[in-house]
Image (spheres, grey):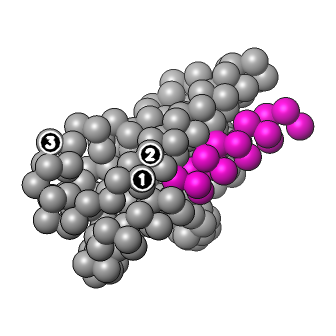
Amino acid sequence: MEIEFVGFIAVVLLAYLIPGPDFLLVSRYAVQERRLGLIAALGAQSGLCIHMLIAAVGLSAIAAQSAEFFNIVRWLGAAYLVWMGINVLRQSRHPIASNEVQKEDFSNNYRRAFVNGFLTNLLNPKAIVFFLSVLPQFMNPAADAVRQILVLGVLDVVIGVVWWWGVVAIMQQVAGVLRKPLVRQWWDRLTGGLMISAGVLLAKNGTN
């Protein structure tokens, strides 16, 4: 089995370096609490695992040939991003002290962090495109396609885990500043606005 690992790793690293909705989500949770950031990242990578498994059984090819299905995923993803952004903006209206954040807001939010990360990537049409169009370019046409998809998919997820660990570690270094009530208020406004903008752009691209 001859797979172009070097080229694939380079493309994957580039994809992770370009911030997307998952980056906004993981960063925001990481500022609130290290474990929340890691759990949100785990959710995001779990969403990619679903796309990998779908691609492995061939459903991605069927889905990609259906413009209607692809548009449904696109609109669901756009709506979810806008919904999350609106919630973040609502929270920014009532900034609280960092010690209250740890005690009241985020002690029981691990499930929410995972689900939000999971749905963010599960409803991301770019993930479908990646596993359908980008990943096969590094596969050997003469070898087992399913095995290669799984190998490259797992490699993508593992690289992502390392990447998110680094992102969370960096955000923790500036968390003390970003947890201050006024700074946190503007940080929430920024991330909420970017999430809404990403959702609008995603929906707009679907109409072109």
Is 176 displayed left or right of 190 in the figure? Answer: left
Q: Nearer the viewer, residue 64 or 108?
A: 108
* Crowd band around label 2 with a 10 angstrom C-alpha radius: few (<14), some (14–19), many (20+): few
Image marks 1 and 2: residues in contact by CB distance under 8 Å = yes
- Residue corresponding to mark 2: 90
- Let me know if residue 147 appears in the view: no
Residue range corresponding to the magenta coloring: 192-208
* The stretch drawn in magenta includes residue 204: yes
- Amino acid type of the residue tagged 1 in the rendering: Arg
Image coordinates for residue 187, horizontal then vertical, percent:
45, 66
Question: Can you give x and y, in whole percent of width and height, for residue 8 in the image?
Answer: 58, 62
Q: Is residue 55 magenta?
A: no
What secondary structure is the magenta-colored segment mainly? helix
Query: The disc labelled 3 sits on which kind of residue?
Result: Asn
Q: Earlier in the sequence, mark 3 or mark 2?
A: 2
In the displayed structure, 181 sits above or below 58; it is below
Residue with the mark numbered 1:
93
Residue located beneath label 3 in the image = 108
Residue contact between numbered discs 3 and 2, judged by CB atoms under 8 Å: no
Q: Are marks 3 and 1 in contact (CB under 8 Å)?
A: no
The residue that appears at 72% across and 26% down in the rendered structure is 71
